[in-house]
Amino acid sequence: MAGVLLWVVCPKGNATALLSLIPRSGKHKRCRVHQKVKFSTGVSAISSAVANPARSSEEKVYDVVLKQAALVKEQRGKKPLDLGTRTETDGFTDWDLLNEAYDRCGEVCAEYAKTFYLGTLLMTPERRRAVWAIYVLCYAVWCRRTDELVDGPNASHITPRALDRWEKRLDDLFEGRPYDMLDAALSDTVSKYPVDIQPFKDMIEGMRLDLRKSRYMNFDELYLYCYYVAGTVGLMSVPVMGIAAESKASVESVYNAALALGIANQLTNILRDVGEDARRGRIYLPQDELARFGLSDDDIFRGQVTDKWRNFMKDQIKRARMFFDEAEKGVSELNAASRWPVWASLLLYRQILDAIEENDYNNFSKRAYVGKVKKFASLPVAYGRALMGTSKLF
């Protein structure tokens, strides 16, 4: 379950997501993305879920979004504790060791997410260190650890009980009882910012889902999985990234835009890794949509690029881009020091979809990637957008 360090707020594997579910009159409303864009069938992807009396995945996730946004609202206007000053924190009062823990998180980030790391250097010291702790520990460490549980050489020996132990470790971390140095940095961060444990628990739930599920009947099912394994990272990081003081957007809308980015990233992972996943017996594509284009699991395993496959992929890429478009509206509302790394990740990851098209939709045997020249060319563009400031209400 491959992924990239990215920001998020509505997305297989381990990347990042924020769906624009703008609340009206305190009621759950369908995502504005789904309301605007129609797929090849002429009906929105969520219509079947809305017709169903059972709650859709979007509604379930939105409950979590509301809870996270409420925490940020309480904290908004207050300056986070300076992580560079000496404080007494339960579980790790040795400040030298805590500084070492944060430094180690920075080293891991610099090694495995070079572009993102450069972006974090523009943040204030306290935000930078906190983001390192969340992105490196939660994503690069927690996700890599749980990836190893699900997809690594020991995957066949892992049981739900093993993930239960990880969840217990998470509870201890939030209560100020970290198990190791990297845990200590995150434990310190969540004690200083309005970060809730639920997204972390939901991420582990995504790992549980991977232990028992390798097919998704429709996009509603896939959406929930994408939230678990990627969208959660956005909910974790928005409090640290911060919302610009001059922003007129609601906190909920900023979270939702971040979730859309996470979903876009995760859908991009899915489309990029179709062949790799199929070789592991996994298909992270909506079964009903495959059938609509006259495709089946056998076609995926056969790995032939046909006109049916091209048309199917065009539809899937259209959806991913739709989420990227919605995510862009929220990036501008972030704290000025946090915008550049987020814009960089968005622009770079979006180009993977272009690469799939350039490969003639052959994601069975060709891996879509963005070359170094394009990556470096994207950085000044991202920086320019970051300087533009907040947008009007969206």
Image (cartoon, rainbow, N blue to C red):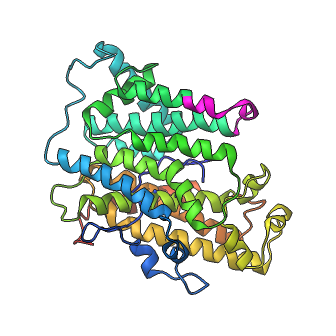
Q: Position of residue 351 (x, y in %)?
A: 54, 64
Q: Residue at x 67, y 74 (%)?
A: 289
> Quick check: is 267 in the magenta stretch?
no
Q: Name the foreground residue: 8 vs 221.
A: 221
Left or right? Give the position of 280 relative to 31: right
Provide the residue span drawn in magenta: 151-164
Q: Position of residue 134 (x, y in %)?
A: 40, 37
> Quick check: is 154 in the magenta stretch?
yes
Q: Position of residue 77 (x, y in %)?
A: 13, 47
Residue 386 seen by the camera: no
Image quadrant of residue 205?
top right
Q: Quadrant of the C terminus?
A: bottom left
For the view shown, which residue lies furthest in the front direction?
Answer: 53
Relative to 83, say whether 352 is above or below.
Answer: below
Q: Position of residue 5 (x, y in %)?
A: 48, 46
For the view shown, which residue lies furthest in the bottom direction?
Answer: 42
Residue 150 seen by the camera: yes
Relative to 238, say whether 152 is above or below.
Answer: above
Relative to 66, say whether 132 is above or below.
Answer: above
Q: Residue at x 25, y 51 (%)?
A: 70
Left or right? Give the position of 20 relative to 154: left
Q: Give the number of callouts.
A: 0
Q: Name the foreground residue: 7 vs 42.
A: 42
Q: What's the magenta bit mostly, secondary-structure-wise?
A: helix
Q: Name the foreground residue: 359 vs 203.
A: 203
